[in-house]
């Protein structure tokens, strides 16, 4: 993983979201805050391709993508040393992510909450 803070580049966030409007809103919020956004992409396959082909400093993954879950992308992020968090409509206690210290944002969330997640993922 490239460390954006030492290279001077803007940190790059992978955004995996299958709903167009929330994806575009999140992309705008993250970009306006000074980060580069890879995506948004609507499915696991495209997210895995971007992880293979792009420099990514952190990832925000919608958990449920029309019935397909994004855990393969999270596992790939783990293998690459990329911090990641999830957005979801599920209640956090129903997920097995807390034990892994994976940040969770329950939908709907505010722009500020999204940016707090980005900052946490980047260790800021």
Image: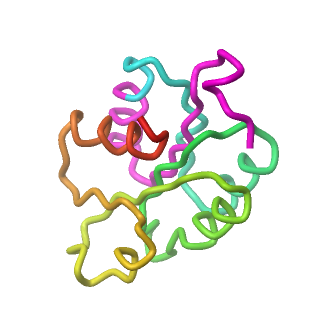
The quarter of the rendered structure image containing the C terminus is top left
Tell me where residue 112 sits by quadrant. Answer: top left
Question: Does 111 sit above or below residue 81?
Answer: above
Question: Does 46 sit above or below residue 89?
Answer: above
Q: Please give the name of the residue rendered at 55% of the width and 44% of the height, measured from the top-left corner.
A: 58
Residue closer to the observer: 115 or 5? 5
Residue closer to the observer: 21 or 80? 80
Where does residue 78 sit, x and y in percent of width and height?
64, 64
Q: Is residue 109 left or right of residue 28?
A: left
Q: Please give the name of the residue rendered at 76% of the width and 52% of the height, measured from the top-left corner.
A: 49
Where does residue 115 sit, x and y in percent of width and height?
32, 35
Residue closer to the observer: 32 or 44? 32
Q: Please give the name of the residue rendered at 69% of the width and 61% of the height, measured from the top-left corner.
A: 45
Report the magenta residues as a range: 1-29
**Farthest residue, direction right:** 53
Q: Is residue 15 magenta?
A: yes
Where does residue 98 sit, x and y in percent of width and height?
34, 74
Q: Is residue 102 magenta?
A: no
Where does residue 77 sit, x and y in percent of width and height?
64, 59
């Amino acid at each position: 993983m490239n460390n954006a803070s030492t290279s001077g580049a803007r940190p790059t966030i992978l955004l995996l979201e299958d709903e167009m409007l929330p994806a575009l809103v999140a992309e705008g919020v993250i970009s306006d805050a000074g980060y580069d956004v890879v995506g948004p992409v609507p499915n696991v396959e495209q997210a895995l391709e971007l992880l293979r082909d792009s420099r990514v400093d952190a990832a925000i993954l919608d958990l449920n993508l029309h019935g397909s879950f994004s855990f393969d992308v999270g596992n790939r992020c783990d293998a690459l040393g990329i911090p990641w968090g999830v957005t979801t409509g599920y209640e956090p206690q129903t997920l097995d992510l807390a034990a892994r210290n994976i940040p969770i944002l329950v939908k709907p969330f505010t722009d500020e909450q999204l940016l707090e997640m980005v900052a946490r993922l980047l260790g800021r």
